[in-house]
Image: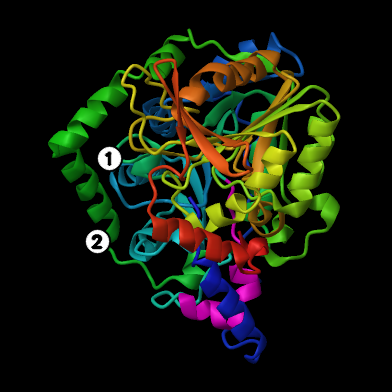
């Protein structure tokens, strides 16, 4: 989810910034900040001892498990928080103060009470309402909280854009959860009910659980961000903690646990298949050469060079597709250059397919405008386009991972090349991810995972999405498949005239670089 100010407002603020004197408010110096590093001597922890025999049996490879189920994705995070003995390094773009967010914060708090060192790094764009709680957590002797590119105006944050737009428009979009430096989770999910099936709305998302060498890589990358010039100790930004705040967190967690709906959710968590298999040692890992890619945190200050950016390294490691490219991106904004690159692949015989959100399913219509104006050019180049429905009509299909569920919106970010390699991470295929926000992900050399993605495009996705095509008269049509039959829709499905008009008008604005 992209919870930034609306792009037109950003444009206005950017122009206003140029007319304001610099330095209206200054961030505090970081001279007194204490650097810290990930623990490397964790082989003697329970997690380390359990993992060691498996890693030793697969030299040079990492163990990967795709977290496609929303309940499993939350349950395994709670389990890791409970199992950690030395450290928890946690990095997120969004952390909601809802059922899942409260329960997971309390899990971190309880770990700290056991003596576990907890480092919590949050992008400050989405911490509104959390200041008191974060300050209280930071006051715990075993917890340190840092904020990435923080806002100095805590109540009226939009004011910060007037004097510091260039910095505040750059956000840390990374997501990782690492226990004892031995097990890590990365991917597309933030922390909130909509990512874990705890509410009426669900983001269809994808994470990976990983052990082996790549887990150590994530731990080291966390250190890069933790000690970067953009990461400010919470104590330098937030008001002093209130003594009762941590007690309120525990009370809130207990109150949630007594709610009937929450109790049912917790019951489902307790029956998580993945967690049971993990605890019993029966969990089957995909062992593959896995490389972690991430932006240099200097990108958060606009100081990263081209070779330090994830897109450059992503194309280098993934290689040039020879036969097939499958892209999954909720916020797909290819730009003119991206269209040209994909068209060139298609001309060379590469089958290119893209799965993104329909207008009815997206949570950011402004971003959809950047995609919509490129659709015709993509189709003319021979690229296949699929757009996720907001609701799935067929109750027979129940895949809550890559392909979603009822009242869902696509949020997974992944791609597959030639049925050999896959990328899974936080990177949206759009200008914001490429140029403004920091991102991370894994390149996994796994024909099995790549083949599974190809099968989804062949069978599941056409049922769960509209396929956009060009009609003989050159106009766009949307093909809806149900029970083996095709229905041709002449208008963008699930939308009203004013929505389509707004998207078209926004598409004319010179804001593509912000999307």
Way the structure is coloured: rainbow
**Callout 2 crowding tier (Cα within 10 Å): few <14, some 14–19, many ≥20:** few
Tell me, yes or no, if residue 129 can be seen here: yes
Numbered range of the magenta stretch: 158-174
- Which x, y percent locates residue 314? 77, 39
Which residue, given by chain and number where applicable, does mark 2 sit on? 244
Give the mark nearer the N terminus: 2 vs 1.
1
**Residue under the point 67% across and 33% down:** 442
- Quadrant housing residue 136: bottom left
Q: In this view, does 474 lie above or below 424?
A: below
Q: Which numbered disc covers residue 389?
A: none
On the rendered image, what quadrant is the C terminus found in? Answer: bottom right
Q: Nearer the viewer, residue 373 or 120?
A: 373
- Which x, y percent locates residue 455? 58, 16
Q: Is residue 37 magenta?
A: no
Q: Nearer the viewer, residue 350 or 219?
A: 350
Q: Nearer the viewer, residue 93 or 372?
A: 372
Q: Which numbered disc covers residue 200?
A: 1
**Farthest residue in the front direction?**
473
Say what secondary structure mark 1 lies in.
Answer: loop
- Which x, y percent locates residue 304? 78, 59
- Quadrant housing residue 508: bottom right
**Residue under the point 50% across and 40% down:** 411
Point out the frontmost of discs 2 and 1.
Answer: 1
Q: In this view, does 298 lie above or below 150?
A: above
- Which x, y percent locates residue 448? 65, 13
- Disc 2 versus disc 1: distance between alpha carbons? 32 Å
Tell me, yes or no, if residue 230 can be seen here: no
Q: In this view, does 35 lie above or below 25?
A: above
Main secondary structure type of the part rendered in magenta: helix
């Amino acid at each position: 989810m992209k919870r930034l100010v609306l792009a037109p407002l950003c444009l206005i603020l950017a122009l206003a910034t140029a007319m304001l004197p610099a330095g209206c408010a200054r961030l505090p110096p970081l001279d007194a900040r204490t650097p810290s590093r990930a623990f490397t001597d964790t082989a003697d922890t329970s997690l380390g001892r359990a993992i060691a025999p498996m890693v030793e049996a697969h030299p040079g490879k990492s163990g990967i498990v795709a977290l496609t189920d929303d309940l499993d994705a939350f349950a395994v995070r709670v389990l890791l928080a409970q199992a950690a003995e030395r450290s928890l390094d946690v990095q997120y773009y969004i952390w909601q103060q809802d059922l899942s967010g409260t329960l997971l914060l309390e899990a971190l708090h309880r770990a700290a009470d056991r003596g576990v060192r907890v480092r919590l790094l949050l992008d400050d764009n989405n911490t509104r309402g959390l200041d008191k709680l974060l300050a209280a957590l930071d006051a715990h002797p075993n917890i340190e909280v840092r904020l990435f590119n923080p806002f100095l105006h805590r109540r009226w944050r939009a004011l910060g854009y007037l004097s510091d737009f260039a910095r505040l428009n750059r956000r840390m979009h990374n997501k990782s959860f690492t226990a004892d430096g031995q097990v890590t989770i990365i991917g597309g999910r933030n922390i909130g009910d909509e990512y874990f099936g705890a509410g009426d709305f669900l983001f269809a998302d994808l994470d990976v659980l990983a052990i082996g060498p790549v887990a150590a890589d994530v731990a080291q990358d966390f250190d890069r961000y933790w000690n970067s010039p953009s990461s400010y100790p919470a104590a330098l930004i937030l008001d002093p903690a209130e003594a009762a705040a941590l007690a309120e967190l525990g009370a809130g967690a207990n109150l949630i646990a007594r709610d009937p709906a929450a109790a049912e959710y917790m019951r489902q968590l307790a029956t998580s298949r993945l967690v049971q298999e993990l605890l019993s040692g029966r969990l089957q890992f995909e062992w593959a050469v896995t490389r972690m890619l991430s932006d240099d945190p200097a990108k958060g200050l606009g100081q990263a060079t081209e070779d330090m950016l994830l897109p450059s390294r992503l194309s280098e490691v993934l290689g040039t597709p020879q036969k097939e490219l499958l892209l999954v991106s909720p916020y797909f904004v290819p730009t003119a250059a991206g269209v040209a690159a994909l068209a060139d692949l298609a001309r060379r015989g590469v089958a290119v397919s893209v799965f993104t959100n329909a207008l009815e399913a997206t949570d950011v219509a402004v971003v959809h405008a950047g995609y919509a104006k490129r659709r015709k050019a993509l189709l003319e180049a021979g690229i296949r386009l699929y757009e996720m429905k907001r609701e799935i009509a067929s109750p027979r299909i129940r895949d809550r991972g890559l392909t979603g569920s009822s009242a869902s919106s696509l949020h997974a970010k992944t791609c597959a090349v030639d049925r050999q390699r896959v990328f899974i991470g936080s990177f949206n295929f759009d200008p914001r991810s490429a140029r403004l926000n920091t991102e991370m992900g894994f390149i996994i050399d796994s024909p099995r995972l790549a083949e599974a993605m190809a099968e989804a495009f062949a069978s599941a996705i056409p049922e769960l999405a509209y396929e956009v095509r060009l009609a003989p008269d050159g106009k766009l049509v949307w093909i809806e498949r149900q029970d083996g039959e095709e229905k041709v829709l002449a208008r963008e499905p699930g939308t009203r005239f004013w929505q389509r008009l707004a998207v078209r008008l926004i598409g004319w604005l010179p804001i593509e670089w912000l999307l």
